Image (cartoon, rainbow, N blue to C red):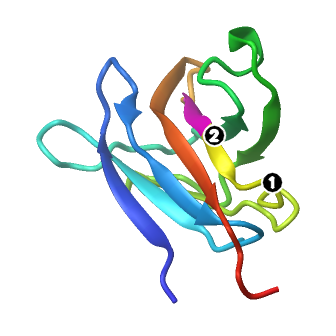
C-alpha cells in the first residue's frame, strides 16, 4: 500500500493541513514541498521534525507535547519528506490534537512549513 501524500506549496506562512489517523497505525506519509510554480523544492541537506501536541502552540501554548518524529527518508531534489510514526507514537487517546512540521535547511535556517489539526480516531481491530 503506498504512503499517503500531500503536495505543499512553501510560502512564508505555514500551509494549513489537517491529518486524520487511526490509533496505533504506523504507515508512512509524505509531503511534497513545491515552489508556487509547482516545481519541487530541492531539500538536499535538510532535516524535518513533525511535532504533535494537545494545543496549537504546544508547550508554549499551554499544551503538552505528545511526540516528535524526524523525517524517515533522505530529502532531496524531489521535494518529498516522509514521516513514519511508530505504533507507540500513535498510541494516544482518541481526540483532536495539533501538529506542525519544522524544516531546517542545509544552512541551518529554520522554518515552520506545515501546521494543522491531527485527529486521532478509534481503532476497531485490536
Q: Main secondary structure of the magenta part?
A: strand
Query: What residue lies at 77% left-to-right and 60% top-to-bottom?
Result: 90
Say which element carries label 2: strand
Identify the image quadrant of residue 88: bottom right
Q: Nearer the viewer, residue 3 or 99?
A: 99
Asked if residue 101 lies in the magenta stretch, the reply is yes
**Highlighted magenta segment, given as a residue range:** 98-104
| Label 1 sits on residue | 92
* Image x and y of residue 65, in percent: 80, 31
Query: What residue lies at 32% left-to-right and 33% top-to-bottom?
Result: 10
Is the residue marked by circle 1 packed among few (<14), some (14-19), or many (20+) residues within 10 Å?
some
Q: Nearer the viewer, residue 120 or 58?
A: 120
* Image x and y of residue 7, in percent: 31, 53
Say which element carries label 1: loop
Q: Nearer the viewer, residue 30 or 35?
A: 30
Query: What residue lies at 57% left-to-right and 38% top-to-bottom?
Result: 46
Residues under numbered marks 1 and 2 in contact, where contact means CB atoms less than 8 Å apart: yes
Q: Is residue 123 left or right of residue 126?
A: left
- The circle on residue 48 is none
| Label 2 sits on residue | 97
Instruction: Kindly report the distance in space between the C-alpha atoms of the residues bearing marks 1 and 2.
Output: 10 Å
Q: Earlier in the sequence, mark 1 or mark 2?
A: 1
Q: Is residue 77 left or right of residue 73?
A: left
Amino acid at each position: 500500500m503506498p504512503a499517503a501524500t500531500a503536495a505543499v506549496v512553501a510560502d512564508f506562512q505555514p500551509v494549513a493541513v489537517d491529518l486524520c489517523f487511526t490509533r496505533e497505525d504506523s504507515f508512512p506519509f509524505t509531503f511534497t514541498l513545491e515552489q508556487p510554480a509547482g516545481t519541487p523544492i530541492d531539500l538536499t541537506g535538510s532535516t524535518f521534525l513533525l511535532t504533535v501536541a494537545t494545543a496549537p502552540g504546544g508547550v508554549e501554548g499551554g499544551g503538552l507535547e505528545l511526540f516528535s518524529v524526524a523525517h524517515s527518508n533522505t530529502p532531496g531534489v524531489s521535494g518529498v519528506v516522509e514521516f513514519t510514526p511508530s505504533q507507540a507514537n500513535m498510541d494516544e487517546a482518541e481526540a483532536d490534537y495539533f501538529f506542525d512540521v519544522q524544516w531546517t535547511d542545509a544552512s541551518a535556517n529554520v522554518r515552520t512549513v506545515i501546521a494543522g489539526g491531527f485527529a486521532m480516531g478509534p481503532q476497531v481491530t485490536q
